[in-house]
Image (spheres, helix red, strand yellow):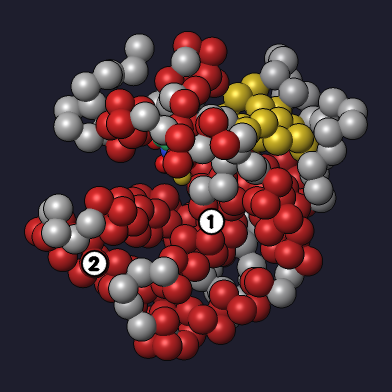
Amino acid sequence: MPDDAAQARFQLHGMTSPNVRKIVLMLEELEAPYETALVKVFRGEQFTSEFRTLNPLSKVPVLVDREAEGGPYPLFESGAILIYLAELHGRFLPTGGPGRYETLKWLFAQTSNVGPMLGQLNHFMVAGEAEAPYAFARYKALALRIYALLDERLAARPYLAGDDYSIADIATYHWAGYVERHPVDPAAYPHMQRWRAAIAERPAALREVAVRDSFVYEPADSLAAATPEAMDRFWWRDGAKAPPS
Ligand SMILES: N[C@@H](CCC(=O)N[C@@H](CS)C(=O)NCC(=O)O)C(=O)O
């Protein structure tokens, strides 16, 4: 669990999103010392110059390693963060051989495909099917393809990279949970569901849920309180009338 009493080695900037949750799950698996910093994304905090020194892409998660050689080191891109933590601790990523590349293939499949495609469906579900029927149909079809791909992969092996739980599973687990919220039939993916249930039982996954619940916005910083301009900027909508500095 986050260690806010002393200055912990790692500082995680984030919120309740799946790309942040995968880093919390990894930190919990490693029992690494970390503290969390909530980024007020509906207030545009990710676009401030201070945050952009940590991540010029203005995205969470960011993990700062305060004990890195040469001084505090900020990492962005959740896949890179997972590899960094795995190599630092010598866990969840084989150091060589086919297992390493099976893990990296499925890790990159998550960051370049699973997350972006399911994320676009989330976006167009919020926007409303009637608003953009072409985009909605496209991302629904791509989401179905992603769930079928994961199910097929997990039909023949317990975990994405093979016999062992790895950073590929840690990266994909929370994204796969959208099967319960997307307009698809979760029962159509029994192998993926068996894999999700196995990970959900891990003590680190149970602790992660408590950390997710600790990322709470004050009402004034919440989605419900965001101005139309802030939402345009958050969704990069309507030409993002107020471009970030
Ligand atoms: N490829 C990035 C994606 C990061 C990302 O999309 N983060 C979202 C939350 S899951 C975010 O920061 N959204 C706020 C924004 O885009 O302004 C990663 O894997 O870290």
Depth order, front residue of 27/42:
42
Indicate left or right for 114 with 174 as reference: left
Q: Label 2 sits on what residue type?
A: Lys
Residue 227: percent from left, percent from top: 36, 29
Q: Nearer the viewer, residue 12 or 210?
A: 210
Left or right: 81 in relation to 58: right
Disc 2 and disc 1 in contact, CB within 8 angstroms: no
**Residue 239 at least partly seen:** yes
State which quadrant residue 64 falls in: top right
Which residue is at the far right?
A: 6
Name the kind of residue labelled 1 in the image.
Ala
Q: Quick one: label 2, few (<14), some, or many (20+) residues within 10 Å?
A: many
- Quarter holding residue 71: top right
Which residue is labeled 1 in the image? 171
Secondary structure category for the residue under label 2: helix
The image position of residue 150, as x and y in percent, is: 41, 73
Q: Residues within 10 Å of mark 1 (few under 14, many from 20)?
A: many
Q: Quadrant of residue 196?
A: bottom right
Vertical position of residue 128 compared to residue 145: above or below:
above
Which mark is drawn over residue 140?
Answer: 2
Which residue does the image show at 22% across and 35% down from the upper left?
237
Q: Secondary structure at mark 1?
A: helix
Please tell me which residue is depicted at 59% across the width and 59% down the height of the picture.
Answer: 170
- Tell me which numbered mark, 2 or 1, is placed earlier along the sequence: 2
